[in-house]
Image: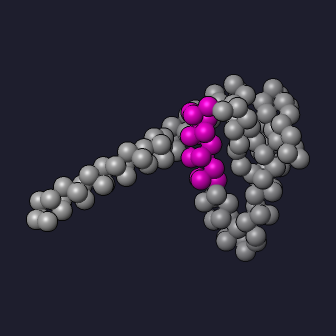
Amino acid sequence: MNLNMRLATLLSGLVLALCLSGNVLAMSLEEAKNQLETVKTEGQVGETQSGYLKVVGSNGQAEDVVEVINEARRKEYARIAQKHDIPVTQVETVAGQKAIEKTPAGQFVEIDGQWKRK
């Protein structure tokens, strides 16, 4: 196989990989932050005791928001845990409690595995 054929094959594979990962690249953290209040108000997303968001009802946009925001939360929780030399689970639990407390009436929270409107 000549160099041009190898390069074409490599580029085709790269294009395919990028297409398949398009969902992951579809939303930036800033876009997710901008859409978070909307998906929470619409009842698509709720806060959990674990400190992370979860999709209440299936919606592609809500799933993307949850994925992006939760990844940012994971990184921040790990940073805080390392800074204070405590387990990440402790940070997650405290963050979950605070998020549930701050959740406005009418939005969903997950308590002991059950969704409830606050």
**Labels in figure, total:** 0
Left-right relation of 15 to 4 = right
70 falls in the magenta region: yes
Q: Position of residue 56 (x, y in %)?
A: 73, 35
Residue segment shown in magenta:
59-73
Q: Position of residue 35 (x, y in %)?
A: 58, 32
Look at 61% across and 35% down and name the residue there.
62
Q: Quadrant of the N terminus?
A: bottom left
State the colouring used for the structure image.
Answer: one colour
Magenta span: predominant SS is helix
Q: Residue furthest right?
A: 112
Q: Position of residue 41 (x, y in %)?
A: 70, 27
5 falls in the magenta region: no
Look at 59% across and 46% down and name the residue there.
67
18 lies above or below 46: below
Look at 66% across and 33% down and name the residue there.
58
Q: Is residue 111 visible?
A: yes
Left-right relation of 89 to 33 = right
Q: Residue furthest bottom?
A: 85
Q: Nearer the viewer, residue 60 or 45?
A: 60
Look at 52% across and 45% down and name the residue there.
29
1 lies above or below 113: below
Q: Position of residue 23 (x, y in %)?
A: 47, 43
Q: Residue furthest front?
A: 1
Q: Is residue 40 visible?
A: no
Left-right relation of 73 to 86 = left
Q: Nearer the viewer, residue 66 or 9?
A: 9
75 lies above or below 110: below
Q: Quadrant of the C terminus?
A: top right
